């Protein structure tokens, strides 16, 4: 006899649904746990394009950083080029 799953409702569940819709239902439970923690602690959103799954890791997009900075009432975002990651010296 198969167990019935409860329907996904609420903000975290809608983000999990968006994740599965974009990257497939086979996203690992570990990644889903990480996503849940990110949504709970930062308010980041898959459906808004704040975060991307690349090579099995979560990356915050540029627009995601801007939305996060606005929510946290930051007055600016400072960036620094890291030479090891630059193609030109």
Image (cartoon, grey):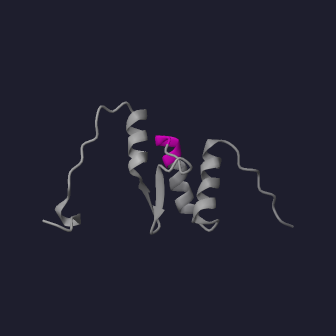
| Residue extending farthest right | 1
Position of the C terminus, as image quadrant, is: bottom left
Q: In front: 32, or 18?
A: 18
In the image: residue 12, left or right of residue 35: right
Q: Which quadrant is home to the N terminus?
A: bottom right
The magenta stretch spans which residues? 38-43
Q: Looking at this rendering, what residue extends furthest in the front direction?
A: 88
Task: Work out whether residue 1 or residue 57 is closer to the camera in this orientation and state it.
Answer: 57
Q: In this view, does 86 lie above or below 65?
A: below
Could you tell whether 36 is left or right of 13 in the image?
A: left
Give the image location of residue 45, x and y in percent: 52, 47
Q: Classify residue 21 by image quadrant.
A: bottom right
Q: Which residue is drawn at 62% across and 66% down?
A: 24
* x 28%, y 40%: residue: 77
Q: Is residue 66 above or below residue 85?
A: above
* In this view, 38 is above or below 84: above
Q: Which residue lies furthest to the left in this view?
A: 89
Q: Main secondary structure of the magenta part?
A: helix
* Image point (30%, 31%), residue name: 75
How far across and how far down the image is residue 16, in percent? 61, 53
Residue under the image location 51 percent in, 48 percent down:
37
In-image side of 3 versus 42 (left or right): right
Tell me where residue 5 appears, x and y as whole percent. Answer: 77, 56
Residue 73 belongs to magenta span: no
Where residue 54 appears, x then y in whole percent?
Answer: 45, 65
In the rendered picture of this protein, how many numbered marks are placed on residues? 0
């Amino acid at each position: 006899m198969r167990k019935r799953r409860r329907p996904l409702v609420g903000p975290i569940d809608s983000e999990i649904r968006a994740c599965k819709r974009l990257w497939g239902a086979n996203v690992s439970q570990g990644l889903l746990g990480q996503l849940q923690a990110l949504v709970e602690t930062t308010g980041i959103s898959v459906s808004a394009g704040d975060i991307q799954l690349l090579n099995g890791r979560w990356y915050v997009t540029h627009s995601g950083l801007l939305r996060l900075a606005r929510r946290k009432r930051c007055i600016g975002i400072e960036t620094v080029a890291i030479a090891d990651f630059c193609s030109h010296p």
